[in-house]
């Protein structure tokens, strides 16, 4: 297994948009209705099988609270791709994504961006982040950490971005 390439990816966005829940759903197949906010940063690893072969992702979960900004900045270093996550049921979280993008790109030069609208189970409207994604030339996916819808596709898209960076 040591011949599998390892790529660091980051998951960023406002607090309570579901970043940790997306990671837990993907890596552990679990969803918890009540979560404690991430303090600083957490990470997990997962092997993703792509058509070109398997890659291992080191998935870094960035705390969304403003008070952790100073801690986050160094944690982006080496990220080949960053998922910018917003809550489909909270439009303000989409409006904050340009600032998250700037933070990620300032601290991980060349990181590729994926825009992710989470909480499909709470918001029937689809496509809310497509305009932003199109404007920055990034792919866009919608997910529900609760039901698992779109979660595998999100991490596969991150793996593809990371492996082509």
Image (spheres, helix red, strand yellow):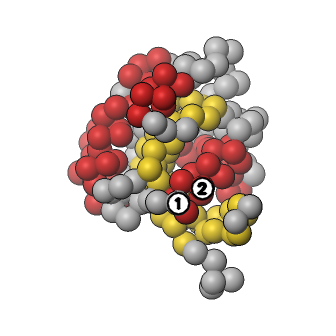
- Residue at point 59%, 31% (across, down): 118
**Residue 164 seen anywhere in this rendered image of the structure:** yes
Residue 131 lies, in percent from the top left, at: 48, 22
Quarter holding residue 5: bottom right
Q: Is residue 146 above or below residue 83?
A: above
Residue 75 in the image: above or below residue 123: below
Nearer to the camera, 117 or 137:
137
Residue 2 in which image quadrant: bottom right
**Which quadrant of the rendered structure holds the N terminus?**
bottom right
Residue 48 falls left or right of residue 130: right
Assess whether mark 2 and mark 1 are in contact (beta carbons under 8 angstroms).
Answer: yes
The answer to whether one can see residue 37 in this image is: no
Label 2 sits on a secondary structure element that is: helix
Residue at position x 63%, y 77% in the image? 4
Give how far apart the Cα atoms at labels 1 and 2 are. Answer: 6 Å
User: Could you tell me which residue is drawn at 67 percent across and 38 percent down?
Assistant: 145
Relative image position of residue 110 (x, y in whole percent): 35, 55
Give the residue number, with chain letter if any, for mark 2: 160
**How far across and down, in percent of the image, does residue 83 sit?**
49, 44
Report x, y in % for residue 52: 70, 65
Local crowd size for mark 1, using a 10 Å CA cut-off: few (<14), some (14–19), many (≥20): few
Q: For the image shown, how many numbered marks are present on the structure?
A: 2
Closest to the observer, 24 or 12: 12
Tell me if mark 2 has few (under 14), some (14-19) or many (20+) residues whose alpha carbon lies within 10 angstroms of its own.
some
Q: Nearer the viewer, residue 37 or 77?
A: 77
| Residue that appears at 59% across and 57% down | 159
- For the residue pair 54 and 75, the one nearer the viewer reads as 54
Q: Which residue is mark 1?
A: 164
Q: Is residue 57 above or below residue 101?
A: below
């Amino acid at each position: 297994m040591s011949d599998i390439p390892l790529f660091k990816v980051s998951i960023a966005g406002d607090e309570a948009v579901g970043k940790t829940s997306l990671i837990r759903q993907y890596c552990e197949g679990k969803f918890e209705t009540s979560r404690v906010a991430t303090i600083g940063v957490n990470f997990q690893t997962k092997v993703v099988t792509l058509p070109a072969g398997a890659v291992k992702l080191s998935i870094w979960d960035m705390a969304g609270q403003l008070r952790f900004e100073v801690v986050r900045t160094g944690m982006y270093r080496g990220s080949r791709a960053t998922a910018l996550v917003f809550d489909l049921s909270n439009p303000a979280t989409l409006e904050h994504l340009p600032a998250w993008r700037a933070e990620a790109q300032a601290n991980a030069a060349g990181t590729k961006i994926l825009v992710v609208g989470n909480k499909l189970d709470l918001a029937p409207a689809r496509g809310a982040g497509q305009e932003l994604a199109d404007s920055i030339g990034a792919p866009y996916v919608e997910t529900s950490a609760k039901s698992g819808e779109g979660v595998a596709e999100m991490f596969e898209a991150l793996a593809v971005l990371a492996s082509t960076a």
